[in-house]
Amino acid sequence: MNLVETLGLEIGVRQAGTPAADRAAQAVADAFGDAGLEPGFHEFGMLGYEADEPELEVEGERWDAGPCIYSNPTDGTVEGRVRRLGTHSIGGFFPEADVFAVEDEDGRELARLLMTPFGGPAIPFLTGARQIAVGPAVFISGEDAARLREREGVLARVRVGGRFVPGLTERNVVAELRGQSEEAIVVSAHYDSVWRGPGVIDNATGVEGVRRIAENLAGHGHMRSLIFIAFAAEEIGCIGSRSWIFDSEVTGELGRIKACVNLDCIAHGDRLELMASPKALADRLQGFAGELGLGERYDLNIGPAGPGVDAFPFHEKGIPAATVSHFGYDEYHLPTERLELVDEQRLADSVEVATLLIESLLEQPVQRG
Ligand SMILES: [Zn+2]
């Protein structure tokens, strides 16, 4: 069984809070079971968001726009002049991206146009504001942001029609492999996808990676325990991992978690990104990448744990956390994330380097940062 195909092709688009996400959770649980684990579900309540296709017209011309998740709707279609407010970098980690306001005659803001944080096409994404609901906003491409910089004061029409969906329950798929010690290493990947995105690369590949690691490590004894988790609702603010961490902290379980090793987008993309904190963990990961000769095969980017992935909330709790990822690709968060993009070599290499790190952590965790 290959979860890339099951999630990316058979189920396809599986936004948090939808029946497709539910089917995805079940499919992952079945696959974990086949890999020799005994999976269960961690359920949590959630505020969902249903995005409409946003509309953006600049001087009568239709421009591409991606929905901003948890954006309030505009009051019908609004029209005003574009003013550049400045730039924003999510968490001070992502590249600086332009932020424009569309303002009425009195200078009151009607909507925002946010340049995609990656500089590419107008994808669905979240603002970096540390609150859930934001004012009406859409994402525009890096190229369109550059065009707008030259045309400040132009007339723009915007329509945002998203809805908040209260009362949802989502579920993380969790399977523990008991070792000699209660101390545990979390191995994770998120299974949800973005609006209209089949999420083949992001992140059916990561979940398949976790499944392969589980299959390799199940069936023999380990010094410490392993907790395999397929997180829900990552794409709308890492809500699945944050809920799991919150609940584990409440029950006192979090204290036995010694590290998190996370896989996100592992089979396509320009660079092999190994983002880990504290530095001792990044050094260890870099060492394994070196042993496998990955620096000769890929453009390596090694750095600290950054926001926007499920490893980050662990890092925020002071737990050593690493993400393995191949990143930088044109189809990111778009409907064009297709099965043909999957590079088996990248996937296998990611699994191998992650497995070496996990095995070393089972023997000897790194000190908290
Ligand atoms: Zn992802």
Image: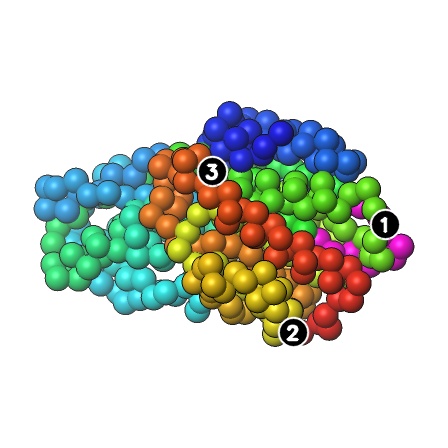
Query: Is 202 positioned to the left or the right of 255 in the image?
Result: left
Tell me where residue 268 appears, x and y as whole percent: 44, 47
Look at 33% across and 48% down and name the residue there.
330
Of marks 2 and 1, the one in the foreground: 1
Residue labelled with disc 2 = 280
Residue at x-position 41% and y-position 40%: 341
- Amino acid carrying label 3: it is Val
Which residue appears farthest toward the right when viewing the image? Answer: 180
Please report whichever mark, 2 or 3, sits nearer to the chain's N-terminal start.
Answer: 3
Q: CA distance from mark 2 to mark 1?
A: 26 Å
Amino acid type of disc 2?
Ala
Mark 2 or 1, nearer chain start = 1
Characterize the magenta stretch by its predominant secondary structure. strand
**Mark toward the start of the polypeptide (1 vs 3):** 3
Callout 1, which amino acid? Gly
Residue 181, magenta (yes or no): yes
What stretch of residues is rendered in magenta? 176-186
Is the residue 248 above or below the residue 197 in the image? below
Q: State the residue at coordinates (35%, 37%).
A: 336
Provide the residue designation for mark 1. Answer: 221
Task: Identify residue for label 3.
Answer: 200
How busy is the neighbourhood of tag 3: few (under 14 within 10 Å), some, or many (20 plus)?
many
Q: Look at the numbered discs 1 and 3 and tell me whether their residues touch, using CB distance below 8 Å.
A: no
Residue 144 x/y as whole percent: 20, 53
User: Callout 2 environment at 10 Å: few (<14), some (14 to 19), or many (20+)?
Assistant: some
- Image spot of residue 337 (x, y percent): 40, 38
SS at mark 2? helix
Position of residue 238 measured from the top left corner of the image (x, y, whole percent): 55, 50
